[in-house]
Amino acid sequence: MSNNTKKTLETIFTKARIYLAVIAIVLILLCIQNPIFIIPSVILYILLLVYTYWTDNKNKNELDKHIQELTFSVDSIAKKAMVNMPYPLAMTEEDGNVIWKNVSFVSEFGNIEIKSILEEVIKEAKIEIEKKKTEKKNATITKQVKIGKKDYKIMIYKTDIKSKNRKKKNLKTYAMFFLDNTEFLQISQKLKDTSACIGIIMIDSYEELIQSMGQEERTQVVTEIETKIYEWVAKIKGIALKTERDRIVFAFEQKYLDEIIENKFEILKETKNTEKEGVIPTTLSIAISADGSSISERFKDTIEAMDLVLGRGGDQAVVRRKGKYEFYGGKKQEVEKRTKVKARTVATALEELIEEAPNILIMGHANGDIDSMGSSLGVYRIVRSLGKEAKIVNNTYGMTLKDFIEAVEQEEEYKDVIIDKNQAINMVNQDTLLIVVDTHKKTYVEVPEVLQKTNKIVVIDHHRRGPDYIDNAILMFHEVYASSAAELVSELLQYTKNNAQLTTFEAEALYAGIMVDTKNFTFKTGVRTFEAAAYLRKNDIDIIKIKKWFQSDLESYNVIADVVKNTEIIRGNIGIAEYTEEDENASLICAKSADELLMISDITASFVIGKVKDTVCISGRSIGDINVQLILEKLGGGGHHTVAGAQIQDVTIEEAKEQLIEKIEEYFAENLE
């Protein structure tokens, strides 16, 4: 019985009770006045009760009959509507078996085997339905499915059909309502395909390029480069406009973006064919954005993407779409292309910021190494030369810094200079000048919380820029061509207006930073690297003392030897090894083992995998033929052409190895000449 029926009957019964109560009171008063009316009053009241009961039953039966007729009519209309509605409708079991379908379903899918498709749809929908029920939300789920040549939006609702047989379980069924979404998706795709992508092409190191040529040759080379760029843009039906001497802005329809990526940005390779003898290599940097709801937003994203490309050394392309950056190219080793003008400018700007700051913090990356700490001490000396105080934030360090930290603690000047995480958080405020060295990543700094509490950040780093960079720095000295952060800080020291004088210990720390990142001046060294080293050597540094900071004990050396001994060789020249012991020094063992592997002939790249708690760490090294940074970047890591690393959460060493080999194969497939 429906709620409305119940309410109607309750109203009738309530009124009848009131009438009977009034009549009873009148009869009682009449009997009190004259007892002779007692018997007639009782008989009369009984007759009234019988009549009322009979009348109520009659009304109730008539109302029930009317409701049944109305319900039958509504059910008939609903059933006819469901059977004859213009949209396919079906009831299915969990395995996709259709137990009821309407006319439209039969005409739409009569000749198509649909059971397996519906089973897969239900399997995906079940999890979401249960989740929504737990959250007490509408349990209707919508799925996009392609059936035949059409795309459908399916609305799915779970319902149980009750069994009349108590011994049998209720039948779990799913009501599925199909909407033809083909035309809508086609229009959406057409709109997406015809929307504009904005791009920027820059000629790398333009000033150095034209300075290395004569007037006639300069015009010829630049014209040849620009002609190739315009021809490339014309291939994708785009338009291009030269906005500066070294910059061209272009636009094209988004449907050509996949074609550009599939062709691996061939313009990067084509422009290298314009190289002339005695002229520095000609390379391009390309940034493209398909994100943003307007042209202005896309152009802004493109500018940010170009900053990212230049921070990674140029000679590559980056595409921003769906909120992520995709990198292409960058296979070749970076060529030193920086001038001392920038170092001089940054040094002046840094000193001005230091003089204005009420308090100063210097911070490197998590699990700091000697380059990070040496750079911090170098910056500390710049601050002290201006008569200001500074603190160095160092909360974590591995086995690599053990001997060095012990040496720092013996130096009287630094006893109160190095602070931990809690002290740093208590000291920082919006006016604090925070100088970050040897990293540019928000999540990789020693104490990420400190970044969020100040608006004045300086970054000094040499690693190739990744998407997670500190984007609110007011001063950035980011040179990927430098060997180390220590090299950059050494240059800044030479251009300070007060001619900051390093202590011998600080010079040794900076020199050690360069030694470690260049593997004893073997990898990623340029003219500027040796100039910085020569500057530091003038401070009477003790090379033997520095060497002792990095000496391995016999036990560690034997562990490294065991790792190297069990190396697997793939593709003929890539060594992959595993360190299976789980301890806090695993990352150090992996790094040293990867270095040792490069000492073996015929191995041009090495990867060593280890595990620290729930994190698998991978150290990659190369002699230059293979870009390990591009490989490990695919696993969320980064670094340089010859030295890189990555960390993967919640996987086993075996799973990490499988992923690594997969990314190595991808790298060779993408960079196959």
Image (spheres, rainbow, N blue to C red):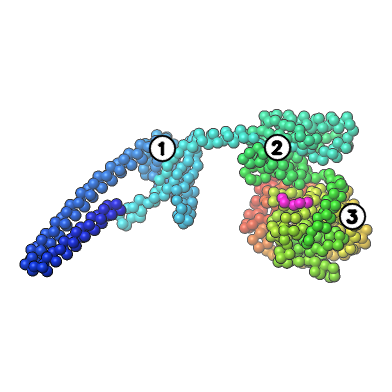
What residue did someone put label 2 on? Answer: 199
Is 382 displayed left or right of 322 in the figure?
Answer: right
Q: What element carries label 1?
A: loop
Q: Is residue 223 above or below residue 280?
A: above
- The answer, for residue 633, to whether it is visible in the render is no
Which residue corresponds to mark 1?
87
Q: In the rendered structure, which disc, 3 or 1, sits on the residue that comes first in sequence?
A: 1
**Residue with the mark numbered 3:** 497
Which residue corresponds to the image point at 77% horizontal and 29% vertical from the top-left?
A: 227
Given contact means CB atoms under 8 Å apart, are the residues at marks 1 and 2 in contact?
A: no
Q: What residue type is labelled 2?
A: Gly
- In front here: 470 or 564? 470
Element on which disc 2 rests: strand
**Comparing marks 1 and 2, which lies closer to the viewer?**
2
Query: Bounds of the magenta span?
Result: 471-475
The Cα atoms of the two marked residues, 1 and 2, are separated by 44 Å
